[in-house]
Amino acid sequence: NKGCKLVGCGSAVPSLSVSNDDLAKIVDTSDEWISVRTGIRNRRVISGKENLRNLAVEAAKKALKMANVEPDDLDLILLCTSTPEDIFGDAPKVLILLDAYLNSNLFMLWQSCKVQRELGCTKSQLAHDITAACSGFVLGLFSASCYIKGGGFRNVLVIGADVMSRFVDWTDRGTCILFGDAAGAVVLQACDAEEDGLLSFDLHSDGEGARHLGAPINDNENGSVLEFPPNRPSYACIQMTGKEVFRFAVRCVPQSIEHALEKAGLTASNIDWLLLHQANQRIIDAVATRLEFPPEKVISNLANYGNTSAASIPLALDEAVRSGKVKPGHTITAAGFGAGLTWGSAVVRW
Ligand code: ACO
């Protein structure tokens, strides 16, 4: 296959809406501070029986319906998430043991397998997770395009889903005000080269910046020798140096978008929509200004959902498609950025 196109999208958010005023009841903050500094007014948070899997499955079903693709027509499911409920999934024990024995990542079957099962897939098509925080969805798109263009895969489901509410410290006003839970999904399909809808990518990581954003394992941090058998580790809540992440995003994202546009042989003026990871309205505005995208070409739904990590781009895309903003043939520049540090851009045609 020489080409790969987007044929469906879907999204899902939890039912509980939490406003800035609600947050002001649990931490020392205000609606004014949050909305002026971030542009966020509400976020959705899982409650009751809602979880990452339900959200991912609901978004995936909507995307498959729009694409007119049956679960069993899928060759691959990529679940981009950094907040899985199960880091080992429910792969058959024998595969997990074989994987450990070979020390390979051949059977990276984590959370995505549960989604595969709940979608009702009966073929043993490959499903694996991609862990790249807020850059996860762009990396998922790139991986899907490689599987299709280089690997002979025909129908690929890419889901971005995160339940950040389970990993934030609800007593830390510097982080808890930013995040929300959601899932978004797209279906990609093999096609002829002339119809190719994934036009270019530009992807980066910088481990130097890892200290600015993380949710590290709690033990052995100071390099002490582990006893045998080791204790089961737990993870810390999300820790972030907001100002550094802000500076990094405003510096690196425009450069990355320029590179992706150059690879696609396009300029900002040829592009219909700028769709950034929804982290902070001031970041979105700064990047748009630097690249000379007028406000009417910028997609933003951050006010309603906050930063939903890997879900933010497909969630905003789905809303823009279903509301009729993004029309068939429109070009979109999407960029993700976050923990790692990682960042990346994609130029796609809807
Ligand atoms: N309410 C009221 N005051 C607050 C709050 C709050 N929620 N949070 C912080 N403050 C206070 C601070 O304590 C500080 O007070 P001080 O001056 O008395 O010390 C003051 O406000 C300024 O704090 P800063 O952290 O310097 O505020 P800043 O303008 O940088 O805004 C923010 C903080 C919104 C977090 C911003 O830095 C930001 O958005 N950064 C980017 C985060 C991001 O995009 N992350 C994306 C990746 S996420 C991922 O990959 C998982």
Image (cartoon, rainbow, N blue to C red):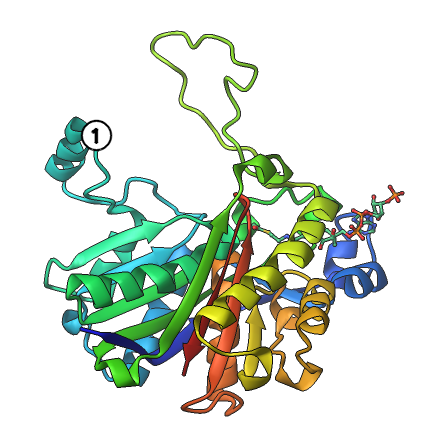
Q: Percent position (x, y) of residue 191?
A: 22, 80
Whether residue 13 is visible: no
Residue 228 in the figure: left or right of residue 172: left
Whether 347 is drawn above or below 254: the answer is below
Residue 157 in the figure: left or right of residue 152: right
Q: Quadrant of residue 300?
A: bottom right
Residue at the (53%, 42%) spot, across then down: 206
> Where is mark 1, residue-wise?
103
Describe the element under mark 1 as helix, strand or loop.
loop
- Quadrant location, the N terminus: bottom left
Q: Percent position (x, y) of residue 112?
A: 29, 54
Residue at the (55%, 66%) spot, across then down: 257
Residue at the (32%, 51%) spot, across then down: 129
Residue 153 in the figure: left or right of residue 346: left
* Residue type pointed to by label 1: Asn
Q: Percent position (x, y) of residue 146?
A: 27, 62
Residue at the (25%, 76%) spot, across then down: 3
Whether 199 is drawn above or below 183: the answer is below
Q: Residues within 10 Å of mark 1 (few under 14, many from 20)?
A: few
Whether residue 198 is visible: yes
Q: Percent position (x, y) of residue 120?
A: 19, 66
- Quadrant location, the C terminus: bottom left
Whether 348 is drawn above or below 150: the answer is below
Of the pair 224 and 119, the residue shown nearer to us:
224
Whether 268 is drawn above or below 176: the answer is below
Residue 56 in the figure: left or right of residue 335: left
